[in-house]
Amino acid sequence: MADWMHRRLWRVVWRRSLALGLLLLVTSCAIPQIKAEDRLFVPVTVELLDVYNLPPQEFEGTTVGGISALVYDRPRDRLYALSDDRGRFGPARFYTLAVTLAQRGTGQPRFDSVSIEAVTPLLDAAGNPYPRGSIDPEGMALSPRDSLFIGSEGDVEQNAPPFIGEFDRQTGRAIATLPLPERYLPDDPDQTTRGVQNNLSLEALTVAGGSSGAGMIEPFRLFAATESALVQDYNDDPSQPLNSRFLHYLIGDDQSTLIAEHRYPLDLEPSGAVVNGLTALLAIDPSGHFLALERAFGLRGMQVKLYQLATGGATDTSTIPSLAGDVSSIAPIRKQLVLDFADTPLAVDNLEGMTLGPRLPDGSQSLLLVSDNNLEDDRATQLILLRLQM
């Protein structure tokens, strides 16, 4: 009996020692530790290549400036640049630009030429120009059906509501308007308790998915976001970040539906900031990843950061009346810093537009950013060229 007990005890000790040895062997291997948050994002890097300053100028009776959105039309190799002029220096409009890139020797790609080819006024559904002050064009996206979706911030003081409209690319005439929830519409211009804040409204717009072929166009998705918090979402605690709202539409031939909405947490407002918010969105894949521009301006000058966004897992906020209180239980859109322009040698201006541009001479993908010069005649419009790798 003693021998049997001894043998059994020896087997138990041997097995446990073997298990412990295997565990130590596995844990001692150089296995990279990946954070759960990192799995949400795709690998994205950008490289600053060049900057081009488009001087203030007149074109066909309009003042070129106030560029708040930029879209690249790849089949035509042209850029569309949206002016946020509310009618002071011409009608609501967008410009068509021809941009060429070049690479000399072993140097990096640069802007070769930038020229304005055309201006297209925006017209309402009846074909008439928009009255002065009734539209504030800020966001723009080119759709798979060759139309332009444009977001207007509106003007609370002029009782002009915000909207997202679809426009004919060639004529500039309005085709349709997307449904916008009542919570975005200001209820009283004198004492607003609901809706967008004036000049902090529908600033960012992008389209993802969809393709055309054999006369058919697949449904696609449009995403829009407010520059800052809605009135009912505003939190005056400076230690807490403000929350924008991020809208997700499904666009089909016969119907356009708002299918979800999410919380987008802005960076904390820098000390002394006069303006702080989200200015541009760009879809970079069909899996819910985006690039986003955040811009702040104040006593510390212009501060601009480029983020990657991951929308997977974000709570649908479409039934949540206010984001002003404790939002810890509301999963937000996740953000990952791609580039802080403070870490570059470039003094950036008021960047408000972003688009995937033409292929660079080496075949890599370009990313173009544009600044809004606020239609000031002594301030250039800044075009920035980056290389995007992902």
Image: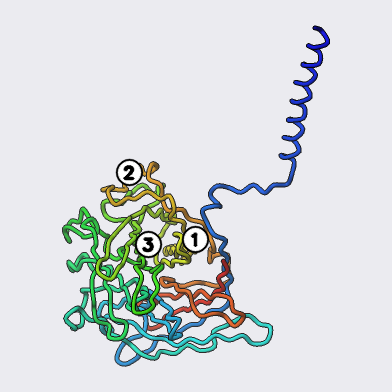
Q: Position of residue 354 (x, y in %)?
A: 44, 72
Q: CA distance from mark 3 to mark 2?
A: 23 Å
How crowded pointer 2 is (Cα within 10 Å; few <14, some 14-19, many 20+) is rated as few
Task: Write the residue at 69% across / 47% down.
Answer: 31
Task: Write the residue at 23% across / 78% down.
Answer: 174
How crowded pointer 3 is (Cα within 10 Å; few <14, some 14-19, many 20+) is rated as few
Q: CA distance from mark 1 to mark 2?
A: 26 Å
Q: Which residue is mark 3?
A: 274
Which quadrant: the C terminus? bottom right
- Tell me the amino acid under the disc marked 2: Gly
For marks 1 and 3 on the same chain, the one whose residue lies earlier in the sequence:
3
- Tell me the amino acid under the disc marked 3: Val
| Left or right, residue 13 beside residue 77 | right
Q: Position of residue 83 (x, y in %)?
A: 34, 79
Q: Position of residue 78 (x, y in %)?
A: 43, 85
Q: Which residue is mark 2?
A: 325
| Left or right, residue 75 beside residue 156 | right
Q: Residue 134's image quarter?
A: bottom left
Seen from this angle, which residue lies furthest top? 1
- Tell me the amino acid under the disc marked 1: Gln
Q: Which residue is mark 1?
A: 308
